[in-house]
Amino acid sequence: MTTRRRTAIVRSVITLGMAVALCAWSKQTPMNSTWQVGGGINITLAATLLCGFLTAGLLSHIGIPKITGYIVAGVVAGPHITEFIDFGTVEKLQLINEVALSFIALHAGAALDRALLSGRTRALILNLVLQSILVPLLVFAAIMAAAPFFSFTARMTQPQVLALAILSAIIAIARSPSSAMAIITECRAKGPFTETALGITVAMDVLVIILFTGAMAVVSPLLGGTETHGWHQAGILGIELTGSLAAGALLGFGIRTFYKRVAKDHALFLLFIAFAVTRLSQLTGHQISAITDLHLTLEPLLICIAAGFVVRNATPFGEKLEEDLMRISLPIYVLFFSVAGASLDLAALAACWPLALILAGARAAGLALSTWTAGRMTGLPDTECKVAWMAHLTQAGVAIGLTQIIAREDPKTAAYLTTLTLAVITLNQFIGPVTFKRALILTGEEGKDRR
Amino acid sequence: MPVFITLFTILCLAFLGYHLVYRSRGRRFHLSGAAFLMVGYLLGPDLLGLLDGETATHLYPLSGLVTGWVGLMYGLQLDLPFIKRITAPFMISVFLDTGLTLLLFFAGALTLFPLLGPGYTLSLALTVAATAACSSQAALVMASPSLKPARSVTSLMRIATAGSLISLGVFATAFFFTTPSPSSDRLSMGIQTNLPTVLMTTAFLVVLYTLFLSERRRREELILIVTGMVVLTSGLAATHHFSPLLANGITGFFLGNTTRYRERILSMVIILEKPLYLLLLILLGARHITFSWQLVLTAALYLSLRTLAKMSGGFLISFFHTDAPLPKRAGTGLMEQGGLAMAICFDAQHAFADPTTHRVVTAILLATLVSDLAGRLTWGDLIPKLEKTP
């Protein structure tokens, strides 16, 4: 290790120590007014940003991706370890976190270049088909085989175990476009492998909703509902999906008009878009529920992905949009993943880690098998065939959202499903970024984006 | 109002605004900060409801960031050589303009506010005086016809800068009277307990900034560090019941004058200044307003008193200011409120939160809106014309 590098590490450790000491001291102040409570949230958020950034910098010296560093900092500061960020604060930071997620989704959509993907359409489609068959199959088989051996599932009835296995199998194909985007941005990766991985990740997040709508119809009678009710829920999910994609496309053309007419202040505009999409999705959901008695909510993640994709591929402002997003992306990534780290449910992991480990293993095996087969069938380079699965382990976002839908059907099964899903997500969020970064290094696409 | 109708209204207004500003013949309309106060109101609890009370609570960090950013920028710009260059005639001019406004408003507010209801009377009087005394420098730059501002405009800009600093000082004293009924020894108590804390925390923050910046970093990393530090400073200030604007201003002043990172941070702070300033206006405009004759009267009183103070101040300056000849109606150039005044209002509505503060800040915003919109139509080219006949 060079002297310069050692000095940088020592300096980072001192800075981290001082920042933690200052924040810990500030937490001693009694909070009497709303303003002081607001100040407390500010300190928490700033500490999350700065300490997450420093921790990630320190961990990057041993080759761990920065996103994992942000998550680790969040976990340490979170309610399960030091309680610097308690459950209440996590709740209060939720809106900012959702806005950050919309922003990241816009970035992911804008990064999807159809021209780069066009040479790999066959590989993309084959991957989607194989992954959406093999991954659920292996996960389903693993749960059904392992269920009798764990106290976690032993308490459940046979139909409940079956429902849990079906839904977990479908949720297993959900990805985390935000994590994938963060890794790609951090590694400044560019190339066919990167584009294919991102394309599959984004498409899978749409596909999982479609498959979930079908699964809901099958599972509903198992959970005591009727088949008609299941199809009703599936129909609502279908409307949500179509509505979100249509709203996203419309928003994309709105962004195009703004870029065409106004040559400045794009950063503020993009943050406003992320905020407006998040809040308007909630508001329209409430209004539609009030008028039609339907639980229908537009999905901000899908709206923003679709908007970014439209700007990138149907307008001449794609590159500019991506540049603008890139410029202000770092604080948003640090914030989002640090808060995500604090929100990770370690209690859920502790409750069912052996089963979660089996499920995560089955999922990884399914991914490896499907990506390898798809790669071989489409004649992709050898290295890509071998390492492609490593790019798909990260999982978050939509998966949690889908478990909430089950809660309306059967709260008990939903509780098991949520615990298990959160445990698997926790595992994948730690391992996924490390493997994805490794895959980018092995394929030689790390550092290829020279912007 | 239903979401869809409000959204449609906003889109129509945006379309209308765009055509009036960019497409109208002669382009008599200008895009000003006031428009963003309106945007805030449209998004606020009375109309669209995107920025309602609950959302505002969740956006506290953003509030800390926007006011803190303005404060940091002011603090960084205040370098000691500038202070050392100040001459006696210049100081007289500053006191004539700012001092007169401060005195008029402080006396007026102290008389009027007890009539509005119980609250932070003294703090609020000082805040209103500080707000009224602030003048925009950016507006003066825009008033200058060429890229290089005329000497008289530069002099007015310097007067506006120095006046703003005095206003900040007055605003700082408002925090020593934060209890609704301050006792006589509150000020000395406040100085004894708060001042050492503020100074020690500032020193700690400057060291932290130095440690962060001692490494060569990319611009995105710099944005993250400064954003984090500004929010941290704002949070520390709020938990100790002090102003985030001032806390960041003080940190910026020490950072700029005791380290070698002034230019590095300032160049980055300026890049995000405008978006964050517009965000401040949107957040400030997003409020519940109960329109009443009392509100309109307070706004009218504020506007007329300020016009009187600034015009008289400008008139007196033209006699005493010797650095450059100034027109008799120089006060016109100091009429626009500027970002600092808005940041003070924003800080005050959180620090002295009660119904009276809410009403007073709303009245100031209404007055600002009127003066800003009317001002752009009249004085936009006034100063260059007067420049020829000092």
Image (spheres, helix red, strand yellow):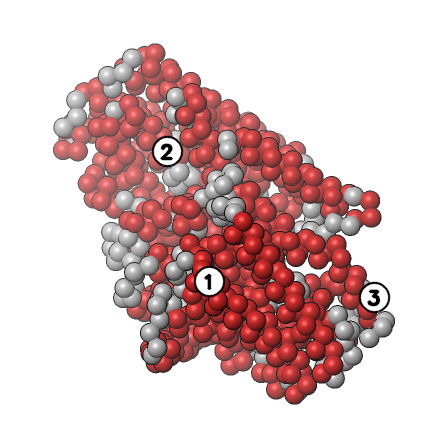
Residue B230 visible here: no
Direction from residue A138 to residue A155 in the image, left or right: left
Label 2 sits on residue = A401
Residue at (55% x, 74% y) in the render: B103
Are the residues under marks 2 and 3 on the same chain?
no
Q: Nearer the viewer, mark 2 or mark 3?
A: 3
- Find the distance from the CA under tag 2 to the CA under tag 1: 51 Å
Residue B114 visible here: yes
The amino acid type of the residue labelled 2 equals Gly
In what element is the residue under mark 1?
A: helix
Q: In the displayed structure, would residue A444 be above or below residue B148?
A: above
In what element is the residue under mark 3?
A: helix
Direction from residue A237 to residue B341 in the image, left or right: right
> Crowdedness of circle 2 by 10 Å Cα count: few (<14), some, many (20+)?
few
Are the residues under marks 1 and 3 on the same chain?
yes
Q: Nearer the viewer, residue B91 or B319?
A: B319
Label 1 sits on residue = B113
Label 3 sits on residue = B385
Give the chain letter at badge 2. Answer: A
Direction from residue B152 to residue A329 in the image, left or right: left
Marks 1 and 3: CB-CB under 8 Å? no
